[in-house]
Image (tube, rainbow, N blue to C red):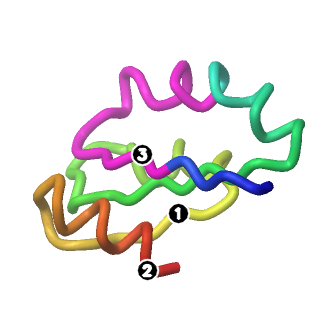
Amino acid sequence: MKISIIVPALNEADGITTVLARLAPLRNRGHEVIVVDGGSSDNTLELARAADRVVSAPRGRASQMNAGAAL
């Protein structure tokens, strides 16, 4: 079974690299990490490119989670 982990983010440049590094063991087992950016004004989007997928969605946890689940 493949699991998709959805990570909503907004201006998380200081922490997104750490989060993705901690999720790396799951990616190595074939699971997917999706970062959904809510319109960050820092470089979160660029740093998040280390995830399997990166998408943008309107700001807000629910809309970001829904956008990730829709993939």
Rendered residue at 34%/74% (across/down): 67
Would residue 5 appear left or right of 64 to someone viewing this image?
Answer: right
Label 2 close to label 3 by CB (< 8 Å): no
Question: Tag 2's secondary structure?
Answer: loop
**Residue pointed to by mark 3:** 7
The disc labelled 3 sits on which kind of residue? Answer: Val
Q: Which quadrant, please, contains the N terminus?
A: bottom right
- The residue range painted magenta reads 6-20
In the rendered structure, which disc, 2 or 3, sits on the residue that comes first in sequence?
3
Q: Quadrant of residue 9?
A: top left
Front-most of residues 36 and 17: 36
The disc labelled 2 sits on which kind of residue? Answer: Ala
Residue 19 spot, x, y in % from top left: 52, 25
Question: Tag 3's secondary structure?
Answer: strand
**Residue pointed to by mark 2:** 70
Viewer-side label of 2, 3: 2
Q: Is residue 64 magenta?
A: no
How many residues crowd around disc 2 within 10 Å: few (fewer than 14), some, or many (20 or more)? few
Would residue 32 appear left or right of 19 to someone viewing this image?
Answer: right
Residue 53 spot, x, y in % from top left: 61, 63
Q: Residue furthest right?
A: 29
